[in-house]
Image: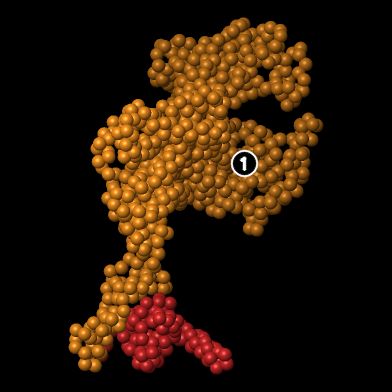
Amino acid sequence: MAKTKNDILQGTLALLVLKTIAAQGKTHGYAISSHVQRVSDDLLRVEEGSLYPALHRMAQDGWLKAEWGTTEKNREARFYTITPLGRKQLELEEASWARLRDGVQRVLRYA
Amino acid sequence: MSWLARLRNVFRPDAVSAELDREMAFHIAERAEALEAQGMDPVAAMQEARRRFGNYGLQKEDTRGRDILVWLDTLLADLRYALRTLRKSPGFALVATLSLALGIGANTAIFTLIDVAMLRSLPVRHPEELVWLTHDGSLSKNPSSFTQALWEHIRDHQDVFSGIFAYGSTGTADLSSGGEARPISVGLVSGGFFSTLGVRPVAGRTLTDADDYQGCPGVAVITHRFWRSEYGGSESVIGKPVLINGQPFQILGVAEPEFFGLEAGYYPPIWAPQCAGTILRGAGFQGGGSLIGRLKPGVTLEAVRVRMAGLAPGILEATLPADLPADAAAQYRKIAFSAVPFATGLPGLRSDYGEALFVLMGVVGVVLLIACANIANLLLARATARQREIAVRLALGASRLRLIRQLLTESLLLSLSGAAMGLIFAVWGSRALAGLLLRPQQMISLELSPDLTVLGFSIAVGILTGVLFGLAPAWRAVRVDPHTAMKPGGRGVAEGHSRFRAGKALVVAQTALSLVMIACAGLLLGSWRRLATIDPGFRSEGVLLAGVNTRRAQVPGEQLGAIYGRILERLRSLPGVVVASAADRTPIGNSNWDGDIDVEGSETASGTDTRVQLNRLSEGYFSTIGAGLLAGRDFNRSDGLGSPPVAIVSRETVRRFFPDAPAIGRHFRFRYTRGFSAPFEIIGIASNTKDHDLREESQPIVYLALSQEATPGPSFNFALRTEGPAAALGSGVKAVLADIDPRFSLELRTLKGQVDASLKLPRAIGMLAGFFGALALLLASIGLYGTMAYTVSRRRNEIGVRIALGAAQARIVRMVLGDVGRMVGAGIVIGIGLSLALTRLVAAFLYGVEPNDPVTLSLSALALVAVGLGAALLPARRAARLDPVAALREE
């Protein structure tokens, strides 16, 4: 079922988004979504719109800062930057992801 | 921070929505552009971009949920919806809100009085630190009254209070400069009064310890209210004298506006140091009174009790009155001290009206319950009418909980707007109630505007009633089966009979509660009527009472007898006066004078009650007040200072002290703490009269002759029986008094007015209970009518079939009335059970009737039956006259 993919993405979406913004600096939603798709080789292809609830939640939690600005093509867009709180969260998520990955790998290798 | 932004966003929903649209539109546009760049044609690119974005509405809704406080947003949406729904049925909204406003208003009004009279703390600094010293009552009848000597010793030896003061009152003092009296009371306070309470002056200064010393001059601090009313708030009054009983008291300052004294409803507009008591009350005046201290930091009430118990032996030994007999001295040494919290001040209103207020609170609480039942019934009917709407919403996926929440929002909107309106009623109502219950002078100093406690109370009652009448109908409303409810013509089937059952249960509850209310109202009104028509032993109509106060003129006591004689003579010659006399005390007044007598020649066993009420009279008193002299003679000129002391006694005195032998000619003596009076000879027997209170049993009263008193008191009463209305003679009396000495002051009232004033509380409670009882009955009959009308209209089909099949009209009427009869019957049975348990709570206000008086209960039940049948008649007739053809065609 297609939904499984979505579930995995939801769980790791915060990590991916934080990582992307941390790497790229000030970024808007479209760029984040494109970046994730490109880098993951279209592996994580879901409804692009589902990025926005996550972005807004992280902004409300204080991990991201959101402000309006203009793109180089002179379009209005909402730009996100990562806050110090967001960086701390990113470290936590990276660590927990690493643990999960190692665990899963071990199971796959030895089971 | 985050929730604040989200809160703000709730109130700018359009801006939030527009911002989301902008952000998402940008995303889609960028994607479409990127796809176009890959070679797609613009229309297909846009479509693909939209497809990849997913369900736009869902994502937007989801994102919006992150940006706002969802619960508040939902609440506002519910409120908007509720407002819209209620606007569609303005009649229902108006009736419900108004009846709730009245119900909650009445509850809030009475709660305001309870709050003012018993709950509010004194308006002083940290009232919770104040402590009131008490003793075990063997010192005086009043366990909070301390003598001057005790006060001084306690003040000097205590180490638990950071400050302590003594508070007493002069009783009535006179502010007038002759003519009509202006009775006020002066608080006599020790120097530490203001500093201990932490009350600051707004002008001048307050009293200090330095003002309170033996032989001090008259100085005074006045209340802010008195300052405004008497002097227009002018600063120049500081240092000027105010005349009290004709004596100048220099005004030192004005207390801060909030401070009314130590007791709500009791209004001493002036405070003077205790040492000035001698100026107002004569050289024999003793200070002391109530002792109130402020706890030192860290000292508890328990610690005070322990410390006072420790200090007691030393203090008592040091203050032991020298000439006390041995047994009295032993008792004095055993007095125990204790302490109680004083945050709410002296308990004047609390002890006078507390019980009455709680009874009234219960009464209006029940009325509100009955009103709630009516609204619940209306809501039940509305729920049926809205069944389709609710079924549609359920079918579209709304959860039942969500719908209950929506319906409860509607109830709460009703009840809280009712509470808001009720608060306005309460502001007016609490004043009206206070006017009905309290004496005018108590009203002056009551701050009846609602405070936070009252506001909280009305909001709490609002929420409670909203949930109370809203929950059951809401629960029932969402229990529909959408499938059945939406079938055309399936309404009658879907509803079943449960809606009837719920409505009928409510009516039964209303009937039961109104029976309790009518029973209580009947008992209280009956008690008032009995009291008002009781024979007090005198005729109060047509008697004018004139209280004369000579204090301002400083007449030596020996001359007063003659002066009173002159006044009496002049009053007797006034046109319109039938007979006039002088009396120290007047019936049902509020002065006390009693003593113990010892009958000559009869051994009084110790422990028997030898207490008698005392009064001092001129001749003609009994005919003036319309009492009778049953035997012997009245006082006359032969009873002078030199002649042997004589007395007239009441019939009850004879019954108690002279049961077998004739009383006239017998002698008795007054027993004092030390020794006896000279013997008095009984010369007459008067009929029994009520002395203090209309409720009292016949009292033994002993009347002494004014003409035999060498030094009568500085104030005395005169009673005039008049031909016309008593009050009309007032100006004549004033003129007489001004002529004799313009410095004398006068207080005029009628005996009828004095007796009526004593009936004020029973009358107010009876009237209020009657009013609310009638209201309860009205509400219950409306509920009954509504339920029956609704039942009949819902059963049109069935009744139509019955008539078509040949049922007679009478049979249909019987069927409907039988339904009502069962409800009312069940209500009465439950109501009688409740009454038997609850009427006992009003026992304190009953006179001449038992709480479970069977006659009152039966009459109340009969009244309910009558009202119930009346309310059912119209629906019953409508059912009987139903046109079966029309009724059946409707289907």
Q: Nearer the viewer, residue B504 or B421?
A: B504
Disc 1, SS: strand
How many numbered marks have been drawn onto this rendered protein structure?
1
Q: At 59% from the left edge and 26% from the top edge, which residue is drawn?
A: B592
* Above or below for A77 versus B863: below
Q: Could you say where residue B593 lies in the image, as x and y percent from the top left?
A: 61, 24
Residue at the spot of label 1: B290
Q: At 26% from the left edge and 34% from the top edge, which residue is drawn?
A: B883
Label 1: chain letter: B
Quadrant location of the C terminus of chain B?
Answer: top left
* Above or below for B735 versus B396: above
Q: Nearer the viewer, residue B131 or B204?
A: B131
Q: In the picture, one chain is orange; tell me its letter.
A: B
Colour theme: by chain
On the question of residue B353 being in view, the answer is: no
Q: Could you say where residue B438 lies in the image, as x and y percent from the top left?
A: 47, 34
Instruction: Name the amino acid type tagged 1.
Output: Ser
Q: In the picture, one chain is red; tell me its letter.
A: A
Left/right placement of residue B656 relative to residue B60 reads right
User: Residue B81 appears in which quarter of the rendering?
Assistant: bottom left
Q: Could you say where residue B808 lies in the image, as x and y percent from the top left?
A: 33, 28
Left/right placement of residue B612 relative to residue B379 reads right
Q: Nearer the viewer, residue A5 or B568?
A: A5
